[in-house]
Amino acid sequence: MDRRAGLVLAGLTGLLLALSGLWLFQGLGTGNRGFILELRAVKLGGLVTVAASVSVATVLFQTVSANRVLTPSIMGFDALYVLLQTLLVAGLGVAGFAALPTGTKFAAEVALMTLLACLLFGLLLGRGARDIPRTILTGVILGVMFRAMSEFVARILDPNEFAVVQGASFASFSRVDAALLPFAAALTLAGIAVALALAARLDVLALGRDPAVSLGLRFDGMVIGVLALVAVLVSVSTALVGPVTFFGLIVAGMAHGVMRSARHAALLPAAALIAANILVGGQLLFERAMGQAATLSVVVEFAGGLFFLYLLLKGRIR
């Protein structure tokens, strides 16, 4: 990592610490400060965890797919999550859904989404990583199928049950469960640590199949391993706060622009730090300047959709 990259990462880290401190201690007043700080710390931990998992997963997925306008959500993770919520509400009712142990529900959602992704990758990439476009296309088709199934099941729900499904189908950074956060954070840290350990191999992987193989990289095995890592990271963030579709696209694009380097040792931490700064700074802005007049997840997804269209219009597909 060169000196410039180190300075950029240090600046992003300092900015995140400043924003985090400002958000934690702003407007405490004279009430029960310990209780307020505890609530804010849980929310802050959730914001940083989701930011890191989504950003790193997006950078890894774009490296494997060799396409800067794709995000892991194209594989149908968000549609599967919505289908799970719909089936649970339809089968258990509102009271039964609310009574589900959060830890068990979180573990089951992460395990199911990861298992489905690994089965998809293993079956479709069994003949080699040349089948990556076919895998992505299959993920798109599965996403459409999951959404259609969700809409079909939703037709039998009463209005109260449908409202619960709708509430669970959109990302909400305010519903982070304090009991789940340590497990989600641990999985995210482990995934990022593995990604950083593979940074040099990811640089080679980004060169393409033929150059990577000529340099001695086990290309097919590396692709499947990275996609499995992406599945774990996306599953954790989705199960923790709900589907986040376009946020990673913004962050990955900004990381490439800021770092001006394709080296993953700098790109991955930069993406995670930029994502965390956006979420923490955005939450601070909405709470203090706008009085909760807007929802952070909606604004972020809207901006991500605009950025996606910008990339398409600029012909940034490679």
Image (cartoon, grey):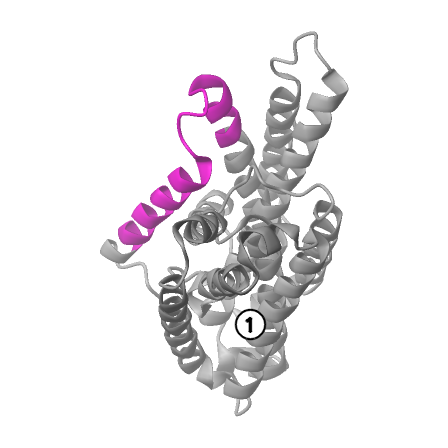
Res. 226 in view:
no
Residue type (three-letter) at the residue carrying disc 1:
Leu
Badge 1 crowding class, 10 Å Cα cut-off, few under 14, some 14 to 19, many 20 or more, is: many
Residue in the picture at 73% in, 57% down: 190
* Image quadrant occupied by the C terminus: bottom left
Label 1 residue SS = helix
The image quadrant of residue 70 is bottom left
Residue 27 as seen in the image, left or right of residue 278: right
Residue in the picture at 55% in, 62% down: 88
Residue in the picture at 66% in, 65% down: 108
Can you identify the residue that label 1 sits on? 205
Q: Is residue 313 above or below residue 286?
A: below
In percent of width and height, residue 130 lies at: 46, 85
Q: Is 64 in front, or is 136?
A: 136
The image quadrant of residue 75 is bottom left
Q: Is 267 in front, or is 161?
A: 161
- The magenta segment is 282-311
In percent of width and height, residue 314 lies at: 25, 54
Q: Is residue 124 above or below residue 248?
A: below
Q: Name the outermost residue toward the left.
A: 313
